[in-house]
Each structure stands twice: as structure tokens, then as C-alpha cells.
């Protein structure tokens, strides 16, 4: 996740999105939320799981009190918003949606974005690496870059940037990751797909989703800088386990003469 956050931070700077109003879908434990708030953004996060939202309210109680942030337990598809967003962001969300709802997500997000706004998504990649983690998290698919391009075209978006992330480090660690997930979360396979999806935002797998404090000495942006450079070199690898992409709604841009 550190590598993903570093890349997101770089991209926000690169495309000139230094601050503004964001909408986040599927915030998990709030790592992207923390990054955006620290950069001066304000906005809202949506999740269907009430426990996830309660934890976010505790973590960001200062920002909530300041009026800079809201954590909302609500269906994103049924939400009505007055203020348009500079950024809609989702991390590991689209893969939880069937084909129809995936298209609905893209269309709904285009309604919420300003004429100069951008949607940024991170999704699991490389279908050949489908495994236990996809099963327990309630995924429908893993993506390829061509599938992301196809999704954007079919839903009226212009794909502006796409890159594979975390290769080759995550690939080397994948057997260990699968072992930890299977040992700690195999019982989730008994849950419904919907319940697995809700639980995916608050996973607690030691050395996978959370780490002892001592490991912060190496799990930080400075120490992992060489690996961030490495993942950029392999950004087009079909074996990258994460895809990052930025897209703009074509209809909205055309409407505003851009």
C-alpha cells in the first residue's frame, strides 16, 4: 500500500490536483483518506459497512469536527450530492461489482465530477494470478490494461493515464501473502459474496494488512523509494498485480466546451 500511496501522491502533483473536494468510494482503513486530508483536501468517503465507517469516524474525528471530512455509511449509487467533486477516487472497489454495477459506478461518478475533474481508480490486475485473496474478498474479476481501456471507452471516459504497480515485489511476496490470507481468512469463504465485500474494507491479517510498529522503519516512503522507481520501469508489465488509472468523462468535457 505504501507504493500505491506514493504513486498516487506523485500523480496528483503531476496533473496539478494539489487540493480540492474529493469523493472516495470504499475507503477501507482510510490510508488514501489520510493522504488526501494531509495534502489539504476536503471531502467525503462512502462505504456500505457500518463498522468501517465507525472506525473512520474515530480515526478522523479531528477533521470531521473541523468540517473537512465526512464518513458516510450509504450506497454510493443512491447518493444525491449538491457539490461537484474535483476528484472521485476508489481503491480496490470496481472488482467487487458485477458488470452492470461496474458500468453504473462509472456513469454515477461522471455525474458527480466537475468539468475539469478526474476519476482515479486502483484495481487488482493480472487474471492469471487469481487466488485465495480474490475469493475471500468477493471479487468478480482481476483486470488487464486492455480491459480498463475497454471499460473507459464503453462508459464514456477518456483514459489519460494507466500503469501497473508493485511489480515485481508483490509478485515475489505473493506465495507468502496467499499463505497468510488462507491461514487467517479462509473461514470467510462461507460468507455470502455481499458479506465478503463488506468485510474486505476491515481485514486484519498480520504482516499483510497491518504490521508491527517496528516495521515502520522500513515500510515507509523513503526506504521504499528504490522499489517505487522499479515499479515505474515495469509499469506496462502484464504481471503487475495492481493497475492504477486516471480518466475523465468525455460527455462532461464536451458539454463544457473542453
Image (spheres, rainbow, N blue to C red):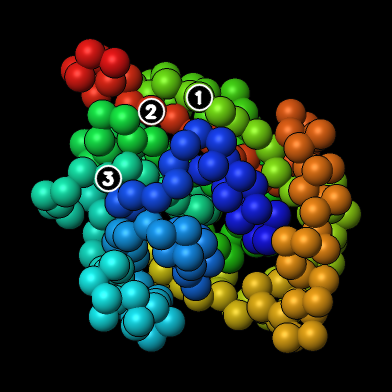
Residue identified by numbered label 1:
160
Residue 258 lies in what quarter of the image?
A: top left
Q: CA distance from mark 3 to mark 1?
A: 18 Å
Residue 27 lies in what quarter of the image?
A: bottom left
Q: CA distance from mark 1 to mark 2?
A: 7 Å
Residue 179 is situated, as x and y percent measured from the top left of the image, at 80, 70
Work out whether mark 3 precedes mark 2 in sequence or the reverse, and give the earlier one.
3
Residue identified by numbered label 3:
85
Query: Quick one: label 3, few (<14), some, or many (20+) residues within 10 Å?
Result: many
Specify whether residue 141 is in view: no
Q: Residue at x 33, y 26 (%)?
A: 249
Work out whether mark 1 precedes mark 2 in sequence or the reverse, and give the earlier one.
1
Where disc 1 sits, the SS reads strand
Where disc 3 sits, the SS reads strand
Quadrant of image for the N terminus: bottom right
Q: Are marks 1 and 2 in contact (CB under 8 Å)?
A: yes
Work out whether mark 3 precedes mark 1 in sequence or the reverse, and give the earlier one.
3
Q: Nearer the viewer, residue 194 or 222?
A: 222
**Residue 248 bears which disc, if any?**
2
Q: Establish if 48 lies above or below 254.
A: below
Amino acid at each position: 500500500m505504501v507504493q500505491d500511496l506514493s504513486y498516487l501522491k506523485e500523480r496528483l502533483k503531476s496533473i496539478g490536483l494539489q487540493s480540492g473536494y474529493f469523493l472516495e468510494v470504499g475507503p477501507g482503513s482510510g490510508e488514501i483518506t489520510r493522504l488526501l486530508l494531509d495534502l489539504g483536501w476536503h471531502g467525503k468517503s462512502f462505504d456500505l459497512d457500518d463498522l468501517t465507517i465507525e472506525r473512520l469516524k474515530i480515526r478522523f474525528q479531528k477533521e470531521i469536527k473541523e468540517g473537512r471530512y465526512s464518513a458516510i455509511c450509504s450506497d454510493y449509487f443512491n447518493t444525491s450530492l449538491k457539490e461537484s467533486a474535483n476528484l472521485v477516487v476508489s481503491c480496490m472497489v470496481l472488482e467487487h461489482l458485477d458488470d452492470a454495477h461496474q458500468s453504473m459506478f462509472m456513469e454515477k461518478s461522471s455525474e458527480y465530477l466537475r468539468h475539469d475533474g478526474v476519476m482515479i481508480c486502483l484495481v487488482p490486475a493480472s487474471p492469471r494470478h487469481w487466488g485465495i485473496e480474490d475469493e475471500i474478498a468477493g471479487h468478480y474479476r482481476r483486470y488487464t490494461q486492455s480491459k480498463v481501456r475497454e471499460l473507459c471507452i464503453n462508459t464514456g471516459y477518456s483514459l489519460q493515464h494507466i500503469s501497473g504497480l508493485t511489480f515485481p515485489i508483490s509478485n515475489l511476496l505473493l506465495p507468502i501473502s496467499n499463505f497468510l490470507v488462507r491461514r487467517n481468512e479462509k473461514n470467510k469463504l462461507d460468507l455470502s459474496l455481499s458479506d465478503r465485500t463488506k468485510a474486505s474494507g476491515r481485514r486484519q491479517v498480520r504482516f499483510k494488512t497491518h504490521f508491527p510498529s517496528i516495521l515502520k522503519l522500513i515500510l515507509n516512503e523513503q526506504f521504499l523509494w528504490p522499489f517505487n522507481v522499479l515499479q515505474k520501469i515495469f509499469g506496462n508489465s502484464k504481471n503487475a498485480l495492481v493497475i492504477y488509472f486516471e480518466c475523465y468523462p468525455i460527455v462532461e468535457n464536451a458539454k463544457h466546451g473542453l
